[in-house]
Amino acid sequence: MREVRKNLAASVMVALLLQGAIPLTAQQSPPPPAPASQSRIRVTTELVLVNVVARDKKGNLVRDLKKEDFTLLEDGKKQEISSFDFENVDQPLTAGAPEATVSGTAATGNLLKGTKNSATSLKARDRRLMLFFFDFSAMEPEQIDRAVNAAKSFVSTNMQPADLVALVSLATNMRVDLDFTDDKAKIAAALSSYTSGEGQGFDNGNTGSTEGAAETGGSFTADDTDYNTFSADRKLLALQSLMQALGKLSQKKSLIYFSNGISQSGTDNQSALRAATAAAVKANVSIYSLDLRGLQAFPPGGEAQAASLHGQAAYSGQSVLNDLSNNASSQETLATLSADTGGKAFFDSNDFSGVFSQVQKDTSAYYVLGFTSNNPLKDGRYRHLKVQVNRADLKLEYRSGYYTDRDFGHLNKADREQQLEDELAAQLSQVDVPLYAGVAYFRQDDSHYYLAVSLLIPGSQIPFVTEKDKDNATIDIIGQVLEGGKFPVGHLRDTVKLAVDSTQQVRRKNVQYNTGFVLAPGSYHLKFVVRENQTGRMGAFEMDVQVPDLRKAPLKMSSVVLSSLRIPATNKKVGPNPLVRDQMETVPNITHVFTADQHLYLQYEVYDAAKGKNPVPATTAANGQPEASKAAATKAPSNSVRVLTSIEFLQGGVKVYESKPVAANEVAAPERKAVVLQMDVPLQALKPGLYLCQVNVIDDVAGNFAFPRFPLLIRETARPATTSNAGIQPTASFWP
């Protein structure tokens, strides 16, 4: 196992989302010893529902089974079936009488909107509940038309009397457009209200290298949150919220997810995916994913409506491989949602009718078994289910298992420590406290890299208690780094104490915790858990990180860190943190959201830059723009490096801003053979909106180059915060 230096440059800061910051520094503590107590948390009684479809050898549905015909096992242990129901959708008049039924009624018209109407009720028994979920957030106009036309065709030709249909759409916000109804006219009218302009352009496409990528962009409408703007998390959170509303009905629900794939940004929260699937299983919802892109062809030069590709990828076949890889990656999350909830995924087909017939087939007749687990632990682990029937000629279809919930009680110190360790090891993590993370890598030597990690919690999520004229709160943080997703090579455990003059200061800001790990090149899985210790609510963030091996890269370059804040570094030992230069620390902005009155600070490094003779240097003025220096040119040393860099902003495929190139002729970090590049771009001249920021880096001597890209949002200037200059104890203060 590689030795990992993990207790390096740990810092905590409360960063104002739009303006200012409250920095606070603290050292990481070593991992605590394993607690002697192994206390567990008991659960309250909770009914678990399992849908079972029974078929004979010919594939025909079996409708005459009774409760005593079934045996239900959880993790190999027999469970008592406390409720039994038979839903016979296609033949409602012959449905068997329920025994200790779990069926019921729910409010009509407003079921999904969360309100009740006692005047009428939705009779869901022996009805097929189908929810059409249209994810317009990244669809192209023609894809929207395909989705709407497919739904219209089903309603007009194949919708059955037992079918109840609801419509939900997601653009900038999730919207319930129609609650469950069997009125075809209402459904058709609601579908006709969707237009090809529903897409909001949240999917920013390829934001990596420009090689093989076309210059495309889209409009942007500001959302309520910055953190999910450039990730798949917002889609998963919308699904999770919808599952909670659907849980009011015990019958099986089928959600048809109209999508063009879920693009991964590289920092998506895997805990959010597990939480969404767990919420669907708990609400008895099966997700059927439909990829509206259909059967695709990937011409080497790109599609006719796309812009010309950069580089040589179109001539080497690399562009086709990239397209195939991106397509498979965008379908992976959809396939996981369907497989883990008992549904099915429909990819690479231009016939969209199959998803509707599959839903009708899976919900024609099924049994609902309810049980209360005899395992009292509420540990968030996955529990495997097995259903058996006393007839050997039958085949059963059911979900393979479910995730248990987790809770928080009054625990002593040892129990609280154990709870953090359990949460870190849990497959289903709590996401009650929003947690966001970002990473950046910098080379230490040929075989080790410093992975800078930033964790961010919205200040509004932290409850404070008043004590001695201060509002106090504590946050526990635990994390681990797994090599290859299996072997632990890094551990983090820290407790952060916050004390402010007014809680209102923090509610408008964020708590950002910065730390780092020294790792060898390879694939790693990172998981972090936070807990606020007033109510015990917890949050988790998981991500996969690839630390590259730059030894064979033409241009050896670090990550690009975007920031709106630089603060004085603490006097404590900061270790190898490359974000600390000249006693100033660059604070990463993991949301990539800025205001027009801020500066965009960028920091990145180039390693092993080639040396040439007598380069023409450039100096940089105080405003960040280069100045020619004839005197410096005459004194330029031989065998110097020459790295050129500039910043571009693209909007809608058009370049709207480009800084003048700046040349670096010095290896500023000789111990790491690194040319350190720091850029300062004032944002006042740019209009608020969504941009694609491109960083141009050229090794002028070797002729190597890189052009990494990042989505970036500039908002209107925020109103000045009315806060005092009092600091957070003991070492914090406000910075402009």
Image (spheres, grey):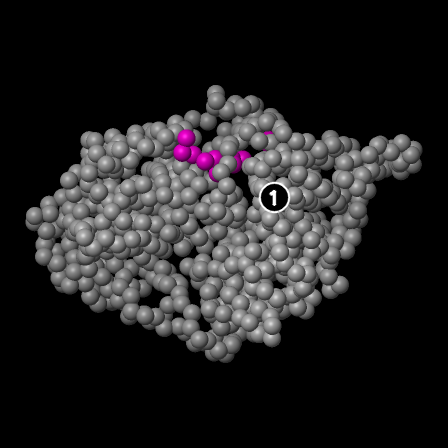
Question: What is the span of residues highlighted in magenta in the rendered image?
Answer: 197-211
Which residue is at the front of the view, 334 or 240? Answer: 240
Q: Residue at x 73, y 58 (%)?
A: 569
Secondary structure mostly seen in magenta is loop
Task: Write down the quadrant of residue 141 in the picture.
Answer: top left
Residue under numbered circle 1 = 717
Q: Residue at x 84, y 32 (%)?
A: 628
Residue 245 placed where, x, y %? 31, 53
Residue 45 part of the magenta-drawn span: no
Q: Is residue 293 visible?
A: no
Residue 134 placed where, x, y %? 35, 39
Q: Residue at x 60, y 70 (%)?
A: 470
Amino acid type at circle 1 is: Thr
486 vs 339, left or right, is right
Q: How many marks?
A: 1
Q: Residue at x 12, y 58 (%)?
A: 98
Q: Is residue 621 visible?
A: yes
Residue 210 part of the magenta-drawn span: yes
Residue 450 placed where, x, y %? 66, 53
Label 1 neighbour load within 10 Å: few <14, some 14-19, many 20+: some
Q: Check the image and report above or below for 301 versus 126.
A: above
Residue 643 placed where, x, y %? 76, 36
Residue lying at the far left of the rendered structure: 94
**Helix or strand or loop: what does disc 1 sit on?**
loop
323 vs 614, left or right, is left
